[in-house]
Image: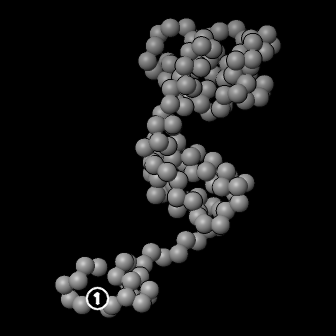
Amino acid sequence: MNLSETARVLAKAQAFDNRTVGQANIAAWHEVLADVDFQDALDAITEHHRTSVEYLSVGHVMAGVAAARRRRRDRIQAAGPVDFPTGLTLAEERAYRRRYHQLVGSGVSGPEATAATDREFGYRRPALIPGSIRRVLAGGPIPTEGDEL
């Protein structure tokens, strides 16, 4: 978060509790919030005022941001491993993973995030071929009625 965004975070806090905000407040809060996502900080302020009557401090904002990060991490872990397209360079894989995790962290399901990330990066995956057809293509017997597909 940059200094201007920190000022906007404090302006939102001020709208709730009529605090006085000056350059010193902005600089002090920015020391703590510099590595925080701007939207996460705004969301943390809203959530704090939904659930608490305490005067908002930067510590409350950080706790709210930490909770949002935990929720995102839990959604990412629940989605399972990333199904990367084949042939990616290391840099492409990192970019793909970052975008996939961003989508899953925001609440998009794993398969939907894979499809959306593929579209964004211009990847086309080969169509899935049922096992019986794959076996025939590999030189195996043609399935007959009653065979497992």
- Residue shown at 78%/25% (left/top)? 3
Mark 1 closeness class: few <14, some 14–19, many ≥20 residues within 10 Å:
few
- Residue shown at 50%/19% (left/top)? 48
- Residue shown at 49%/51% (left/top)? 81
Residue 136 or 4: which is nearer the viewer?
Answer: 136
36 to the left or right of 76: right
Q: Read off the residue under disc 1.
A: 143
> Can you give x and y, in whole percent of width and height, for residue 41 in the image?
61, 26
102 to the left or right of 1: left
- Residue shown at 48%/33% (left/top)? 71
Seen in the picture, residue 41 relative to 119 is either above or below; the reply is: above
Q: Is residue 5 visible?
A: no
Q: Is residue 145 visible?
A: yes
Residue type beneath disc 1:
Pro
> Can you give x and y, in whole percent of width and height, for residue 20 in the image?
70, 8
Kindly give the residue lying farthest to the right in the view shown: 23
Kindly give the residue lying farthest to the front in the view shown: 140
Image quarter (top left, top right, bottom left or bottom right) of the C terminus: bottom left
Seen in the picture, residue 60 relative to 38 is either above or below; the reply is: above
Image quarter (top left, top right, bottom left or bottom right) of the N terminus: top right
Residue 68 or 89: which is nearer the viewer?
Answer: 89
> Can you give x and y, in whole percent of width and height, for residue 134 in the image?
41, 82
